[in-house]
Amino acid sequence: MATHKRPRIDPLTVEVVELIGTVVARYHEEYEEAAAEHALTGAQARLLSLLSLEPLPMRRLAQKLRCEPSNVTGIVDRLETRGLVERRPDPADRRVKLAAATAEGRRIAGGLRDSLDFAREPLAELSDQERLALRDLLRRMLGESAGTDGG
Amino acid sequence: MATHKRPRIDPLTVEVVELIGTVVARYHEEYEEAAAEHALTGAQARLLSLLSLEPLPMRRLAQKLRCEPSNVTGIVDRLETRGLVERRPDPADRRVKLAAATAEGRRIAGGLRDSLDFAREPLAELSDQERLALRDLLRRMLGESAGTDGG
DNA sequence: GTCAAATGCTTGACTATCTAAAACAACCAT
DNA sequence: ATGGTTGTTTTAGATAGTCAAGCATTTGAC
């Protein structure tokens, strides 16, 4: 009866996984809250943050957000309606539309960054040395693929 | 001009925050993928996982999932259509409907758990001692609120 | 006991996010 | 020129989420 394949995970690993789950949940919650403070949805906030660094073609946005390009169309539409993003032609390729944050869009993106207290508050508990240790452990955990986004 | 309030974050903290962001992104991705392997959406998978432990009133489900009860109605509807969940009367209170995983629902939830390789694979890189260190750091980072869910 | 307030769930209207398929324009190789 | 590929949008449809209103039941005041 119900011969499970893998009761093979030790309790410590289980606990770490649960803790990571908690981190993930809290991160998401705080991200959505911070976005909502600026009248943005999570998806809009992510897209706007990307554009606050540099203008990007719709296709690149879709890759970074890991979704279909047709989806990006709608999100950019809504941000454009509010004047936070604009579409520009790409001088090098007339098929391409570059989405770019407007001045107001960059302002909002900056405020969003400042709202992300998750960045500072929970880590404030840790000493420099502990932060270093945490960084190394997370790096190891993520392996060599950390930091790539499919570009 | 543009006197930003907090350029005060050291590079190490920034890096740790970025790593956590990567962990969050990967966790979500793998969760959605695992759910999709069982023809579930993320929300359906979360709800079904909760019910695989014990039947719950709709209201409690909404609390655990941090959403409105009216939203839970729809998710349970869709799972019920597929025979993974059923609604039972609560003998103690005829207003309440207990959502419960069916045998098939529990089977799927078990398969889902097994699919969550995030639990094992990335942590496999770490020794027991490192896992212990990571656990302690995450605990400290999350503070005393870790593990509560608003019940 | 009765009646009003509170509670649990669902419905309806609406928005956002997402996908897949089809359309269209522009690029590029031949 | 022609045909295939690429970048974007449109359309249609599903899910997920909110809020407000509605219905049934419970609870509590009296």
Image (tube, coloured by chain):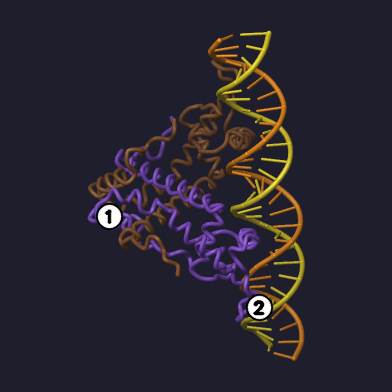
Chain colours: A brown, B purple, C orange, D yellow
The subunit carrying tag 2 is: B
Q: Position of residue A27 (x, y in %)?
A: 44, 50
Residue B94's disc is 2
Q: Residue at x 45, y 41 (%)?
A: A113
Question: Can the viewer see residue B96?
Answer: yes
Q: Of helix, strand and loop, which one carries label 2? A: strand
Relative height, residue A82 to residue A5 (above, below): above
Q: Residue at x 28, y 52 (%)?
A: A126
What amino acid type should be assigned to the residue bearing mark 2?
Arg
Relative height, residue D28 to residue B41 (above, below): below
What residue did someone put label 1 on? B131
Q: Position of residue A26 (x, y in %)?
A: 44, 54
Q: Earlier in the sequence, mark 1 or mark 2?
A: 2
The subunit carrying tag 1 is: B
Q: Position of residue A4 (x, y in %)?
A: 41, 64
- Circles 1 and 2: CB atoms closer than 8 Å: no
Task: Find the distance from the CA under tag 1 to the CA under tag 2.
Answer: 47 Å
Mark 1: give few (<14), some (14-19) or many (20+) Cα within 10 Å: many
What amino acid type should be assigned to the residue bearing mark 1?
Arg
Q: Along the line of sight, which residue is nearer the eye, A151 or A27?
A: A151
Q: Along the line of sight, which residue is nearer the eye, A147 or A44?
A: A147
| Res A90 → quadrant | top right
**Left or right: where does residue B38 sit relative to residue D26?**
left
Q: Residue at x 43, y 35 (%)?
A: A149
Q: Of helix, strand and loop, which one carries label 1? A: helix
